[in-house]
């Protein structure tokens, strides 16, 4: 898969909903009910971070949930890419980008939403052909104001800002011309998962899905 093809696919995924839930699961039993609640609430795109021992099994379980588009987050190495793809991830997300990671995603046909935080990082990805990127960590890096400023010299790059974004902050990003969607973990809080409050998570998803773009 070429970087241009990966970017086209990433854009298609980003356009499915205003928010991509960033999911950190410690318990495999939460996978199916969580995915069902998020999809039902209107957030079909699900980013499962590879930060817990059960993450690959969570991807396998969520890939079975109808209407979900499941990807793997926190991709750091070529081995992560192979494992995520084998588990059924249809896209990848990374906090940054390295040549080895980009090579692996291109070789294994996994569209990557690669992270960038500075103009030089954005330009390096753009030089390689990635016109859709993740802006991370968004809030710590200047927030929506920074992304608006980056859009002036680099309007050809479209972003999924992630990192520190909440329901209250998301509209500031979503109104920018260079933002396709936001990523965030606020729609799947640990407390609600542990309480089995799937209706509560569905409500959070519905609120996020209703954000104007
Ligand atoms: O896992 C990755 O690939 C990442 O780059 C990190 C995540 O996007 C952030 O952890 C988002 O989490 P919140 O700030 O809680 O919304």
Image (tube, rainbow, N blue to C red):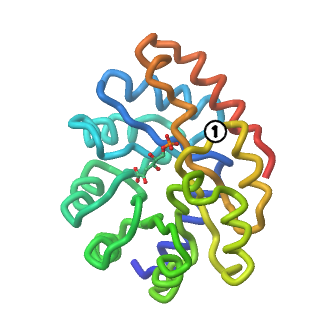
Pinpoint residue 97: horizontal percent, then vertical percent: 38, 70
Element on which disc 1 rests:
loop
Q: Residue at x 49, y 89 (%)?
A: 127
Q: Residue at x 57, y 23 (%)?
A: 201
State which quadrant residue 153 falls in.
bottom right
Pinpoint residue 29: horizontal percent, then vertical percent: 32, 21
Pinpoint residue 185: horizontal percent, then vertical percent: 51, 38
Q: Residue at x 48, y 42 (%)?
A: 22
65 lies left or right of 104: right
Q: Residue furthest top?
A: 195
Quick one: quadrant of the N terminus? bottom left
Q: Residue furthest bottom?
A: 127
- In the image, residue 73 sits, relative to residue 177, either above or below, namely above
State which quadrant residue 64 falls in.
top left
- Mark 1 is surrounded, within 10 Å at the Cα level, by few (under 14), some (14 to 19) or many (20 or more) other residues, namely some
Q: Which residue is nearer to you in this view: 93 or 57?
A: 93
Q: Residue at x 56, y 33 (%)?
A: 186
Name the residue carrying label 1: 166
- In the image, residue 198 sits, relative to residue 152, either above or below, namely above
Q: Is mark 1 within 8 Å of ligand 1?
A: no
- In the image, residue 89 sits, relative to residue 105, either above or below, namely above
Pinpoint residue 135: horizontal percent, then vertical percent: 55, 62
């Amino acid at each position: 898969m070429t970087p241009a093809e990966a970017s086209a696919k990433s854009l298609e995924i980003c356009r499915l909903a205003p928010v991509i839930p960033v999911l950190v699961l410690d318990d495999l039993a939460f996978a199916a009910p969580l995915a069902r609640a998020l999809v039902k609430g209107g957030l079909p795109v699900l980013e499962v971070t590879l930060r817990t021992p059960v993450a690959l099994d969570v991807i396998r379980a969520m890939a079975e949930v109808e209407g979900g588009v499941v990807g793997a987050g926190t991709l750091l190495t070529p081995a992560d890419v192979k494992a995520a793809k084998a588990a059924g991830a249809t896209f990848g997300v990374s906090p940054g980008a390295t040549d080895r990671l980009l090579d692996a995603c291109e070789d294994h046909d996994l569209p990557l939403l690669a992270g960038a935080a500075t103009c030089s990082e954005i330009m390096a990805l753009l030089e390689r052909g990635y016109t859709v990127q993740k802006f991370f960590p968004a809030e710590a890096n200047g927030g929506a104001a920074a992304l608006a400023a980056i859009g002036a010299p680099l309007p050809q790059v479209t972003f999924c800002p992630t990192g520190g974004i909440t329901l209250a902050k998301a509209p500031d990003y979503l109104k920018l011309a260079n933002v396709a969607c936001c990523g965030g973990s606020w729609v799947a809080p640990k407390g609600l998962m542990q309480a089995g409050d799937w209706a509560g998570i569905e409500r959070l998803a519905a609120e996020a899905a209703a954000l104007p773009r």
